[in-house]
Image: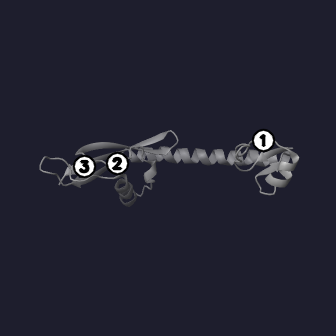
Amino acid sequence: MEVILLKDVKGLGKKGETKTVADGYAQNFLIPRKLVVKKTEESLATLKKENEIEAKKQEDLKNAALEAKVKLESIVLEYKLKAHKDKTPAGSISTKEVEKDLKDKYGISIDKRKFVDKYPMNAFGYTNLKIELYKGVIGTIRVHISEE
């Protein structure tokens, strides 16, 4: 029986793929669990429509990420840290703090897991912090750390 996968099925395939499976496997396991539907003209049309909607959604997300990238590149975040006697910073700035400041000051919500450079910033001066906004779209924020 030819079926269209509605969800990823381990050992069978990914969502949206068309596969040929045994009739009993489809009737007794896959269809009752709503993992697949029988391949018909109607189900193919529905699948095509869902794929178009998903492609449009992904395109909108990519465009929003490109707009956010332009906005982020104009931002410079300022931080002050106390210094030791040998002029090295006492402490560091984490990506969590950067995320919080972006949300509070600029209204930009970014998940801290999207930061490419996950190390804490513990040197005086400017640092470029990269953020992956979407697959292949990487924005950069300038962070300036100065001495108190």
Residue 58 placement (x, y as % from top left): 60, 46
Q: Which mark is residue 145?
A: 3
User: Neighbour class for label 3 at 10 Å: few (<14), some, many (≥20)?
Assistant: many
| Secondary structure at numbered mark 1 | strand
**C-alpha span from label 3 to label 2:** 14 Å
Amino acid type, mark 2: Ile
Measured in 3D between alpha carbons, the distance from the residue under mark 3 to the one under mark 1, in whole angstroms, is: 55 Å
Residue that mark 2 sits on = 75
Q: Quadrant of the C terminus?
A: bottom left
Left or right relative to 61: residue 84: left
Q: Relative to residue 20, is residue 34 depicted above or below?
A: below
Q: Which element carries disc 2, helix, strand or loop? A: loop
Residue that mark 1 sits on: 18
Measuring from the top left, give residue 46's x and y in whole percent.
78, 49
For the view shown, which residue lies furthest in the left direction? 85
What amino acid is at disc 1?
Answer: Thr
